[in-house]
């Protein structure tokens, strides 16, 4: 099996890049940080847009980052079916860039919230969830002030009907009840994928749940799923930009 | 310039002769007091760099920006030395948030509303800055007392790890260039250092221009650029611009390096036109740094800053003549010997006299308090008191996991524990002040704070290796204020000497006074402990079937109630507290030893609320009750349960290891007694005549209340 090559995009103000790279290193992956002014991604297998405050979240989270030069390359990579994961600020950037539907609004309680959160896997498919099973319960950290998922009813219905709501906030028993919703997200949505299924946006931080020493390992499932998905893809080296 | 530089904030003119008496040396000390922060060797070629600093006055006037820039300032102190900041902690003090929370009845609704505004703003400011820059906020403390009404305390600590040569804040090499980096200079924070060195008056709202405005995004860029440069030979020295702005940075760089600097103020990038040399020299605009760069290597340094969209402008050079000389519009605006601004600041040793009513207060008879029944209502009242209850509503607003080092997060232990990646080691960190003891005995209060911090760290299984301190006091120009300061410094020195650990950095915040009077003397201690191997990590908690041991000075004396939360709530604001420093030191040495030997499964030190609250917190943390019988058979039950004397821990131990534990404690000269066992749905404490029995749910709902 070949080593996954992952580009971790770093905007001014990004901070989860190091945590992503540390997990990738611990798995023996060939991950590299890509500064936001770069226009080429070269030979890579996946892109990660990590958490942080890209461009200070000025104007609106992700609103300026979508114009960073690297985003054209990310977009092109995704258009060819390349796997892209955006967590926290990365999800906000993907939605601002129009690569995922909907928007992330300020938490309904108006405060930043950092906590461990139960999540239910509602569609265990695609490059980042393919090795999980539907209805799996996982525990990941959240850490955001603007994570309230919002879309119009038609979009929400469409997302649900096409199985693209992949993660929901739940309690420890897997119930998506209001008390377990940490930010007021519509229909308790924590993560979605695009129509093709290769772009995942989620507010929780899988890279923070990769070591028992720091509280949990459920986040490793996203990395393992990608590894397994890549192993099944033919002619990897040809997907270059 | 002299007004700012000779302020207490910059020159420590009342405190320096006292601070010189503090122990600051030790085998691990790489950098002691006098630099931007202290540094200790932690093996593997790594250093821990840390400091605590106050931002009390700005926070009293503009709480959000005051607290935010306090966090920003202490982070700059750490990365200026080439260390990557890995953790923030805060020690906060406010007046009561509700008038009924003040047993003295001295807090009216308007004062409580003002306190609530300050509290909300400070927490939001800390969250706003720390979350954005991406440094986890892992711990600290919060306390309320009427003495802090209108004069809150906001102390921020930052801890970093350096993996190479530490960058010092000194100029060297005649002809080398001074680069001013980061934000443009504006009219914010003019004379902030002087403002921080006077009592808060009725006109505090008009002092708002003395408060700076923070930009955590800009500081994140500055931090990444400086860290990228910190190993570079092109950089000779770095100094951040904090209190007294350019004046202080230039004077300190020159004075520490034994050289001078010549600066062209016309080159300072400004965010508005028409700044006078006075304003340029004294502005405290945030997120600025001075970098001393080897002549000829400016382009490579500027290129790094440019990548982060930061300007790096040459504003002057290092000269041999030991002066700070600034020109503006071709004229010399100032030319001052550097040492005159720093080292030659006046030193004052005023008269020191204890407060007139101290002896009367200390002679208060606490036996009537000890005779009160230790009922369940008292335990629940203490557990839910604003000074005791869960701090979750605050720390869940702080990103406390960023960097994936946090092994023991806030609320889960006596100290925060962070692993050091790439090694087997971990750091245990705590930030702690002495509660009300300062009102009764500032010397004992400071010694208690040092020992309490060391015990917090020890209860994580770590050896305390050094401390940083923030001395929050009233005006040193009063005989009472100076006496309190002098006593506290003596107490700190005594405890540190007994522990054999150095004080490597610190900060003094004096003039914490409002027209209503001074604050309680509040020495706040930041403690750093080292776990050589993470397998020795201890957490707060027990599991069903564990034996529960009370280890350390039994603390059954009525004196343990002096300064306690219960005494204050019941109006007993007096008494003479006691502290056995050698006994506490023996305990602090014993606990990590037990942890390494694998004898202990969980630990928690007794602090506010005494044994009763400590047992309840262990039960809540473990989601398991306990049965405790006659923890102190010879004592008045209320003194035994709610006395707060420092130097006691609860340990959970496998029943099979009882004999080993007993032997280890005996060898160390530490008292230890098995007081009960863990398990069941309730906390049951038999105190002789009565048995307290409280279900876990009741404990939890008392403890987990919003503010």
Image (tube, coloured by chain):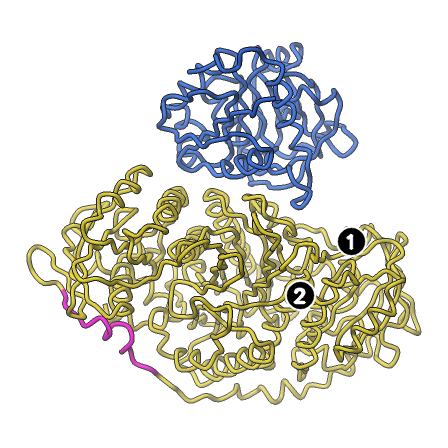
Q: Secondary structure at mark 2?
A: helix
Who's blue, chain-wise? A
Who's yellow, chain-wise? B
Residue B8 position (above or below residue B603): below
Judging by the rendered image, the residue that carries numbered circle 2 is: B458
Magenta span includes B338: yes
Quadrant of image for the N terminus of chain B: bottom left
> Left or right: A92 with respect to B591?
left
Residue A154 seen from this side: yes
Magenta span includes B72: no
Q: Chain of mark 1?
A: B
Q: Secondary structure at mark 1?
A: helix
> Left or right: B267 with respect to B160?
left
Residue B157 position (above or below residue B300): below
Q: Which mark is residue B158?
A: none
Question: Looking at this view, is B48 or B384 the one in front?
Answer: B48
Residue B438 seen from this side: no
Q: Where residue A196 sits in the image (x, y, percent)?
A: 57, 10
Residue A78 position (above or below residue B500): above
Q: Residue at x 81, y 50 (%)?
A: B623
Q: Residue at x 46, y 75 (%)?
A: B474
Query: Residues in magenta?
Result: B334-347
Q: Which mark is residue B620?
A: 1
Q: Where residue B452 sits in the image (x, y, percent)?
A: 64, 70
Residue that lies at the very extreme toward the front in this rendered image: A1
Q: Residue at x 89, y 62 (%)?
A: B655
Q: Where residue B688 sits in the image (x, y, percent)?
A: 92, 74
Q: Where residue A59 sits in the image (x, y, percent)?
A: 40, 31
């Amino acid at each position: 099996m070949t080593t996954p090559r992952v580009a971790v995009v770093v905007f001014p103000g990004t901070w989860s890049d190091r945590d992503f790279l540390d997990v990738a290193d611990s798995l023996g992956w060939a991950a590299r940080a890509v500064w936001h002014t770069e226009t080429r991604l070269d030979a890579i297998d996946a892109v990660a847009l990590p958490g942080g405050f890209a461009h200070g979240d000025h104007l609106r989270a992700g609103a300026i980052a979508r114009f960073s030069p690297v985003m054209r390359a990310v977009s092109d990579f995704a258009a060819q079916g390349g796997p892209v994961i955006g967590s926290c600020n990365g999800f906000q950037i993907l939605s601002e860039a129009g690569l995922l539907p909907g928007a992330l609004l300020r938490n309904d309680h108006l405060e930043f919230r950092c906590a461990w959160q139960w999540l239910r896997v509602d569609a265990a498919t695609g490059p980042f969830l393919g090795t999980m099973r539907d209805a799996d319960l996982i525990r990941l950290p959240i850490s955001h002030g603007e994570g309230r998922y919002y879309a119009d009813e038609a979009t929400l219905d469409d997302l649900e009907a096409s199985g693209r709501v992949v993660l929901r906030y739940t309690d420890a028993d897997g119930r998506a009840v209001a008390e377990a919703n940490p930010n007021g997200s519509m229909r308790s949505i924590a993560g979605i994928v695009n129509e093709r299924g290769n772009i995942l946006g989620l507010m929780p931080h899988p890279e923070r749940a990769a070591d028992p020493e720091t509280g949990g390992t459920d986040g490793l499932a996203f990395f393992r799923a990608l590894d397994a998905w890549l192993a099944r893809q033919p002619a990897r080296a040809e997907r270059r930009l | 310039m002299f007004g700012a530089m000779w302020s207490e904030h910059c020159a420590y003119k009342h405190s320096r002769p006292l601070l010189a008496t503090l122990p600051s040396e030790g085998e691990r000390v790489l950098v002691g007091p006098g630099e931007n922060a202290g540094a200790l060797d932690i093996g593997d070629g790594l250093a821990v760099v840390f400091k605590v600093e106050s931002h009390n006055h700005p926070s009293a006037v503009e709480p959000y920006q005051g607290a935010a820039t306090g966090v920003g300032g202490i982070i700059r102190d750490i990365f200026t030395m080439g260390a990557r900041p890995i953790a923030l902690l805060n020690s906060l003090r406010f007046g009561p948030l509700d008038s009924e929370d003040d047993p003295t009845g001295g807090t009216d609704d308007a004062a409580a509303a003002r306190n609530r505004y300050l509290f909300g703003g400070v927490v939001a400011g800390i969250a706003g800055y720390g979350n954005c820059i991406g440094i986890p906020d892992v711990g600290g403390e919060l306390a309320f007392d009427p003495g802090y009404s209108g004069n809150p305390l906001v102390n921020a600590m930052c801890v970093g790890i350096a993996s190479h040569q530490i960058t010092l804040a000194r100029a060297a090499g005649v002809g080398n260039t001074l680069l001013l980096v980061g934000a443009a200079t504006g009219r914010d924070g003019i004379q902030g250092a002087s403002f921080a060195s006077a009592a808060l008056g009725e006109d505090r709202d008009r002092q708002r221009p003395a408060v700076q405005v923070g930009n955590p995004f800009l500081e994140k860029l500055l931090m990444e650029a400086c860290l990228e440069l910190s190993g570079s030979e092109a950089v000779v020295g770095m100094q951040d611009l904090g209190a007294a702005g350019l004046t202080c940075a230039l004077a300190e760089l020159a004075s520490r390096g034994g050289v001078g600097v010549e600066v062209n103020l016309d080159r300072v990038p400004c965010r508005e036109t028409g700044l006078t040399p006075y304003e340029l020299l004294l502005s405290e605009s945030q997120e600025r740094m001075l970098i001393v760069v080897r002549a000829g290597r400016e382009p490579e340094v500027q290129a790094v800053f440019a990548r982060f969209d930061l300007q790096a402008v040459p504003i002057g050079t290092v000269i041999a003549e030991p002066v700070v000389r600034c020109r503006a519009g071709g004229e010399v605006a100032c030319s001052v010997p550097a040492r005159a601004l720093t080292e030659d600041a006046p030193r004052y040793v005023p008269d020191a006299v204890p407060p007139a009513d101290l002896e009367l207060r200390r002679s208060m008879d606490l036996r009537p308090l000890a005779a009160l029944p230790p009922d369940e209502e008292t335990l629940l009242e203490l557990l839910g008191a604003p000074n005791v209850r869960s701090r979750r509503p605050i720390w869940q607003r702080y990103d406390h996991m960023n960097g994936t080092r946090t092994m023991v997060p806030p609320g889960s232990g006596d100290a925060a524990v962070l692993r050091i990646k790439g090694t087997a080691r971990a750091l245990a960190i705590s930030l702690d002040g002495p509660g009300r003891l300062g009102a009764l005995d500032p010397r004992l209060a400071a010694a208690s704070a040092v020992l309490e911090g060391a015990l917090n760290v020890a209860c994580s299984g770590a050896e305390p290796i050094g401390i940083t301190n923030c001395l929050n006091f009233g005006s040193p120009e009063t005989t009472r204020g100076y006496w309190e300061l002098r006593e506290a410094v003596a107490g700190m020195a005594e405890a540190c000497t007994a522990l054999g650990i150095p004080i490597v950095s610190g900060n003094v915040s004096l003039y914490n006074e409002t027209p209503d009077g001074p604050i309680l003397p509040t020495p706040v201690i930041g403690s750093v402990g080292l776990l050589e191997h993470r397998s020795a990590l201890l957490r707060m908690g027990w599991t069903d079937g564990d034996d529960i041991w009370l280890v350390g000075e039994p603390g059954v004396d009525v004196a343990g109630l002096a300064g306690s939360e219960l005494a204050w709530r019941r109006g007993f604001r007096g008494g003479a507290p006691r502290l056995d420093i050698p006994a506490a030191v023996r305990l602090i040495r014993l606990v990590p030893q037990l942890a390494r030997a694998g004898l202990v499964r969980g630990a928690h030190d007794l602090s506010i609320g005494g044994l009763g609250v400590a047992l309840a917190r262990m039960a809540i943390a473990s989601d398991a009750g306990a049965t405790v019988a006659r923890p102190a058979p010879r004592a008045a039950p209320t003194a035994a349960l709610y006395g707060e004397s420092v130097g006691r821990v609860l340990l959970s131990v496998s029943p099979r290891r009882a004999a080993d534990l007993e032997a280890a404690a005996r060898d160390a000269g530490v008292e230890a007694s098995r007081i009960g066992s863990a398990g069941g749905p309730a906390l049951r404490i038999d105190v002789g005549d009565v048995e307290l029995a409280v279900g876990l749910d009741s404990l939890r709902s008392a403890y987990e209340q919003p503010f």
